[in-house]
């Protein structure tokens, strides 16, 4: 990881700027130029900074629209070829009910 030089310039209570420079010589030249352009030296700060690697991870959250099928209420009659014990009954294709191309699907999906 390479060291960087960070120059900050405070321009007001909630305003400022940050400049990231690759070397101390570049930082010195930048500060010299800012002072020559009229920036007050007390508003400038110089920091030596190292890059710190970090990772970002997330899990997608999937929601099903409210216009889709509703979950069955407790005690409702079984659907999609399930028997009273909620066991899959073979469909005409030879696959168990609720299965399409060897993948078991939620009862929310129509496999016909």
Image (cartoon, rainbow, N blue to C red):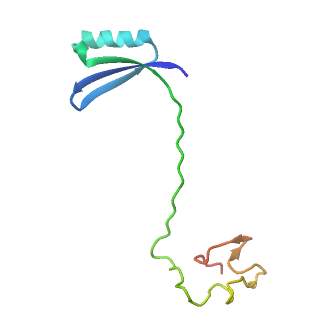
In the image as oriented, which residue stretches furthest toward the right? 94
Number of dots carrying numbers: 0
The residue that appears at 65% across and 73% down in the rendered structure is: 105
* The quadrant where residue 90 appears: bottom right
The residue that appears at 54% across and 53% down in the rendered structure is: 59
Q: Is residue 31 left or right of residue 12?
A: right
Q: Nearer the viewer, residue 101 or 59?
A: 59
Q: Nearer the viewer, residue 28 or 43?
A: 43
Q: Nearer the viewer, residue 20 or 37?
A: 20
Image quadrant containing the C terminus: bottom right
Q: Position of residue 83 (x, y in %)?
A: 69, 88
* The quadrant where residue 55 appears: top right
The residue that appears at 74% across and 84% down in the rendered structure is: 91
Q: Is residue 68 left or right of residue 44?
A: right
Q: Position of residue 68 (x, y in %)?
A: 49, 76
Image quadrant containing the N terminus: top right
> With respect to residue 54, does 84 lie above or below?
below
> With respect to residue 45, does 110 lie above or below?
below
Q: Position of residue 44 (x, y in %)?
A: 29, 17
Q: Is residue 43 left or right of residue 4?
A: left
The residue that appears at 75% across and 85% down in the rendered structure is: 92
Q: Is residue 15 left or right of residue 85?
A: left
């Amino acid at each position: 990881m390479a060291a960087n030089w960070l120059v900050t310039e405070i321009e007001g209570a909630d305003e400022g700027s940050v400049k990231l420079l690759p070397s101390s010589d570049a930082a010195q030249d930048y500060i010299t130029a800012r002072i020559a352009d009229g920036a007050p030296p007390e508003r400038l700060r110089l920091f030596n900074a190292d890059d710190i690697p970090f990772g970002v991870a997330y899990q997608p959250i999937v929601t099903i629209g409210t216009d889709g099928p509703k979950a069955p209420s407790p005690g409702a009659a079984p659907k999609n070829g399930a028997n009273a014990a909620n066991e899959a009954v073979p469909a005409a294709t030879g696959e168990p009910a609720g299965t399409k191309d060897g993948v078991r699907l939620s009862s929310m999906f129509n496999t016909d």
